């Protein structure tokens, strides 16, 4: 039984959807271009042709091969994966929490990660003095620190989910408990920093600077699995998020189990954020601003918003990381400093100027 | 009977809200639920599409028990137009396409898109197809929401105060159009409303709730002023004007 047999597919709508698809293609090409540029640029410049050949497994220059394979490519991929993961989690969070300022960090996850890392550095003794070329400071056992940060991130997420289960999964409860937990973990970090010695303190502060150069191939491998799985999960829920955007009651009328979608969405977003934060440190604002930039261009339809946010996040973090490497070369500026410089004014702009009616 | 509800009991925070409510609606009929604020009209609608599970009672749509259906199945049989709808940065076309969600697989089909276009045309919205919801008037937004419920291809439409925030012209337009769609597609509609005159003009039958029970339900022509007084506590006169019954509160009411 179809009530509307007389309908056609309007050409304007086809064109409208086509423009969004075109935007996705442009972002994909931009990401490829940035990847080649990021691998090519640096203290030692490798020609783009050589980079392409190396990607295809046909690299000729042995020295360039080493630089590409063991340093630049894993870092570039880590930046892309982290950017994509944080941005897609942010886009989903903004819908789940029904809050334009929602991002993975709204739930206090980054603060929890910093506190977990500080705990490992101080009490598990992973922070030591090193004299490598890269840095005088170092983390003696990065895996233990990462694990501790991850456990803290997930603990924060699970507490919020538990509260949401008890009080009904309302966006207000989630945001407010996230803010409260964030403050709690910040206080915990400050306490640890206060009683830490100089080396430990420096390590704690250094850990908190988000920096993609910490990632090697094992980290990249694990991150890619997590980010891809999360992206798939969010894209599968695209219609649920569109429905929730129309209002909880309407979504329920369309057969969406709103509370269930909220809890699982939050759990997946928290998990992917926890993985990224514990491997790379705190990289703020990518999760907040990328979805908003994409929204301004292609609107709120999650069919396009989610993949476009992931691609935009990958491009933004990779570009920021490349800029951070080149600005003070041969020194490397942690990318999180650049993203925060970029993100904070955007954040304020969004606060002041809501979308015009 | 396309929709048949029996003996619905709902408790909220230990207090009984609905006590043994029942109603029946036929194909092509519009039933309006009336009653004072907070009497449980919205609660009843939420029970019908199983968003709220009542303590006891049954809701049968085309002889199938709603409480035994999974969420998608319910959404294919019952279209719900909520009282409050959020206008995001989404075009009217995409907003209506959302109504196909209960039928969608991984991909949107050409048939889905054609139905959306058909629904927009039926509601006279085709020129606004690519307009964003946040640039629309209240009346246009409400039409989009009704179009969304229609492309769900439901047998029953549930509308929670569909005209509460609209001006007179839009109220008339929406209700007239709703009656037309219900008759044309042989659906049934159940709506809640506060405006007695609009309810009398556009519905086939009325149902008054008082203190959690059905006070009276029946064809609109059987309504008496005494019934309105009993339910709302306001003395009224029922007048006939150009073939329409109108409810006029008496001056001593104030």
Image (cartoon, coloured by chain):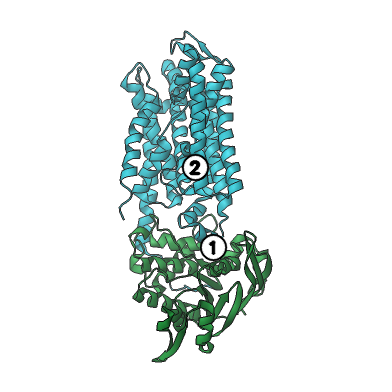
Residue of label 2 = A176
Q: Which chain is green?
A: B
Q: Is residue A315 above or below residue A265?
A: above
Residue A209, position as x, y percentages in the image:
43, 24
Q: Quadrant of residue B154?
A: bottom right
Residue A331, position as x, y percentages in the image:
36, 16
In the image, B68 versus B245, the foreground residue is: B245
Whether residue B32 is visible, yes or no, is no
Residue A303, position as x, y percentages in the image:
46, 51
Same subunit, labels 1 and 2: the answer reads: yes
In the image, A158 versus A236, the foreground residue is: A158
Q: Which residue is pictured at 31% across the width and 22% down the height?
A: A327
How dense is the environment of label 1, judged by Cα within 10 Å: few (below 14), some, or many (20 and up)? Answer: many
Q: Residue furthest top?
A: A131
In the image, A5 versus A223, the foreground residue is: A223
Residue B106, position as x, y percentages in the image:
53, 54
The quarter of the rendered structure image containing the N terminus of chain A is bottom right
Label 1 chain ID: A
The quarter of the rendered structure image containing the C terminus of chain A is bottom left
Please tell me whether mark 1 or mark 2 is closer to you in this view: 2
Residue of label 1 = A253
SS at circle 2: helix
| First reached walking from the N terminus: tag 1 or tag 2 | 2
Q: Is residue A261 left or right of residue B110?
A: right
Mark identifier at residue B166:
none
Q: Is residue A37 left or right of residue B62?
A: left
Q: Which chain is cyan?
A: A
């Amino acid at each position: 039984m179809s009530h509307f047999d007389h309908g056609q597919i309007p050409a304007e709508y086809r064109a409208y959807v086509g423009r969004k698809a075109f935007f996705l293609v442009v972002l994909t090409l931009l990401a490829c271009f940035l990847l080649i540029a990021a691998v090519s640029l640096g203290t030692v410049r490798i020609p783009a042709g050589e980079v392409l050949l190396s990607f295809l497994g046909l690299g000729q220059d042995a020295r360039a091969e080493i630089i590409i394979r063991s340093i630049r490519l894993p870092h570039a991929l880590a930046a892309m994966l982290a950017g994509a993961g944080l941005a897609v989690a942010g886009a989903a969070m903004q819908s789940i929490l029904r809050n334009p300022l929602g991002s993975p960090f709204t739930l206090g996850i980054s603060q929890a990660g910093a506190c977990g890392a500080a705990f490992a550095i101080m009490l598990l003794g992973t922070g030591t003095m090193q004299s490598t070329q890269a840095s005088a400071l170092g983390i003696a056992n990065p895996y233990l620190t990462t694990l501790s940060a991850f456990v803290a991130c997930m603990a924060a997420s699970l507490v919020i989910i538990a509260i949401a289960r008890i009080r009904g999964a309302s966006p207000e409860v989630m945001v407010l408990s996230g803010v409260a937990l964030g403050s709690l973990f910040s206080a915990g970090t400050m306490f640890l920093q206060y009683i830490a010695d100089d080396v430990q303190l420096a390590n704690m502060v250094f850990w908190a600077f988000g920096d993609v150069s910490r990632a090697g191939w094992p980290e990249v491998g694990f991150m890619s699995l997590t980010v891809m799985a999360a992206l798939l999960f969010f894209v599968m829920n695209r219609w649920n998020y569109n429905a929730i955007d129309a209002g909880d009651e309407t979504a329920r009328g369309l057969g969406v189990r709103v509370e269930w979608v909220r809890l699982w969405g939050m759990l997946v977003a928290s998990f992917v954020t926890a993985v990224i934060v514990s491997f790379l440190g705190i990289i703020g604002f990518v999760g907040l601003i990328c979805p908003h930039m994409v929204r301004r261009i292609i609107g709120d339809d999650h069919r396009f918003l989610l993949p476009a946010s992931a691609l935009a996040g990958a491009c933004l973090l990779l570009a920021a990381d490349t800029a951070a490497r080149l600005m003070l070369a041969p020194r490397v500026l942690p990318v999180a400093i650049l993203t925060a410089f970029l993100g904070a004014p955007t954040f304020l702009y969004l606060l002041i100027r809501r979308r015009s009616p | 009977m396309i929709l048949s509800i029996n003996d619905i009991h709902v408790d909220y925070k230990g207090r009984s809200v609905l006590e043994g409510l029942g109603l029946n609606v036929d194909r092509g009929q519009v039933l309006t639920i009336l009653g004072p604020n907070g009497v449980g009209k919205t609660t009843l609608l939420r029970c019908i599409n199983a968003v709220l599970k009542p303590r006891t009672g049954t809701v049968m749509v085309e002889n199938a028990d709603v409480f035994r259906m999974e969420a998608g199945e319910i959404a294919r049989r019952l279209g719900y137009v909520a009282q409050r709808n959020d206008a995001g940065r989404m075009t009217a076309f995409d907003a209506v396409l959302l109504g196909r969600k209960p039928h969608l697989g991984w991909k949107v089909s050409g048939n889905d898109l054609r139905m959306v276009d058909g629904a927009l045309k039926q509601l006279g919205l085709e020129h606004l197809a690519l307009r964003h919801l946040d640039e629309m008037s209240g009346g246009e937004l409400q039409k989009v929401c009704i179009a969304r419920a229609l492309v769900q291809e439901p047998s029953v439409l549930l509308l929670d105060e569909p005209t509460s925030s609209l001006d007179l012209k839009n109220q008339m337009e929406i209700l007239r159009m709703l009656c037309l769609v219900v008759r044309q597609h042989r659906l049934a509609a159940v709506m809640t409303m506060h405006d007695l005159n609009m309810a009398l003009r556009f519905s086939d039958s009325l149902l008054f709730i008082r203190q959690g029970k059905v006070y009276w339900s029946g064809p609109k022509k059987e309504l008496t002023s005494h019934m309105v007084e009993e339910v709302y506590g306001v003395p009224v006169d029922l007048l006939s004007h150009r073939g329409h019954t109108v409810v006029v509160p008496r001056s001593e009411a104030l």
